[in-house]
């Protein structure tokens, strides 16, 4: 259920977000959707495949990343693979700002809620390609190519269960 214009969400600890606190806040939570599949909670929307917390143009960086990797050979993240698959079908993914004008703490909380609601493909619980349950990841952290290589080497040879492989395959088709 998406908050309406008069919705005043209550955060952990019972604190309510107020108009005065919202006007000073700059974070948002966004959803990347694939229009070729339906949202399990709202069939009028595309299926979510990634949820994130943003600041400034963070949401648009996924598009830039996918474009920069389009002609590159090699393994890509599941999120990027979905975007590329959609583009090959002449379909674009949807970038939706779910809620904005949050503190970073509030944004992490909403991000965790949405990831829990939709579930993750890597643990067989849902449709999202997020690798974690959210609420982590420092603001503005950019992974260097050297770090990417180290992560890739660390993951090489890891066994993925049949259940997870089926879920990933289901998400990509």
Image: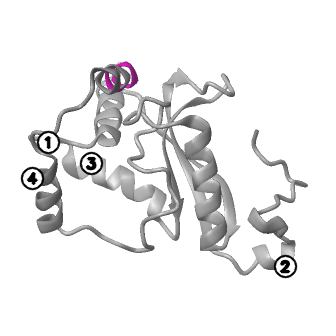
Q: Quadrant of the C terminus?
A: top left
Residue 153's mark? 4
Q: CA distance from mark 3 to mark 4?
A: 24 Å
Q: Position of residue 164 (x, y in %)?
A: 33, 27
Q: Which residue is mark 3?
A: 67
Taking depth in this image into account, of 13 and 167 the one nearest to the observer is 13
Give whichever of discs 2 and 3 has the lower sequence position.
2
Q: Given contact means CB atoms under 8 Å apart, are the residues at marks 2 and 3 in contact?
A: no
Give whichever of discs 2 and 1 has the lower sequence position.
2
Q: In terms of secondary structure, where does tag 1 sit?
A: loop
Label 3 crowd bin: few (<14), some (14–19), many (20+), radius 10 Å: some
Q: Main secondary structure of the magenta part?
A: helix
> In this picture, is 95 found above or below 12?
above
Taking depth in this image into account, of 144 and 14 the one nearest to the observer is 14
Which stretch appears magenta? Answer: 168-172
Q: Which residue is mark 1?
A: 71
Label 4 crowd bin: few (<14), some (14–19), many (20+), radius 10 Å: few
Label 2 crowd bin: few (<14), some (14–19), many (20+), radius 10 Å: few
Residue lying at 63% horizontally and 29% vertically, measured from the top left = 45
Give whichever of discs 4 and 2 has the lower sequence position.
2
Q: Nearer the viewer, mark 4 or mark 2?
A: 4
Residue lying at 61% horizontally and 46% vertically, measured from the top left = 114
Taking depth in this image into account, of 13 and 36 the one nearest to the observer is 13
């Amino acid at each position: 259920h998406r908050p309406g214009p008069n919705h005043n969400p209550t955060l952990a600890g019972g604190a309510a977000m107020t108009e005065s606190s919202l006007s000073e806040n700059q974070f948002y939570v966004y959803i990347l959707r694939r229009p070729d599949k339906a949202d399990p909670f709202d069939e009028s929307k595309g299926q979510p495949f990634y949820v994130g917390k943003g600041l400034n143009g963070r949401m648009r960086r996924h598009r830039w990343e996918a474009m920069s990797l389009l002609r590159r050979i090699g393994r890509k993240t599941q999120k990027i693979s979905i975007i590329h698959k959609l583009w090959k079908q002449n379909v674009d993914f949807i970038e939706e700002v779910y809620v904005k004008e949050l503190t970073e703490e509030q944004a992490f909380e909403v991000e965790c809620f949405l990831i829990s609601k939709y579930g993750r493909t890597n643990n067989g619980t849902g449709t999202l390609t997020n690798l974690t349950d959210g609420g982590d990841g420092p603001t503005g952290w950019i992974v260097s190519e050297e770090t990417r290589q180290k992560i890739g080497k660390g993951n090489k040879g890891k066994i993925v269960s049949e259940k997870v492989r089926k879920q990933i395959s289901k998400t990509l088709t």
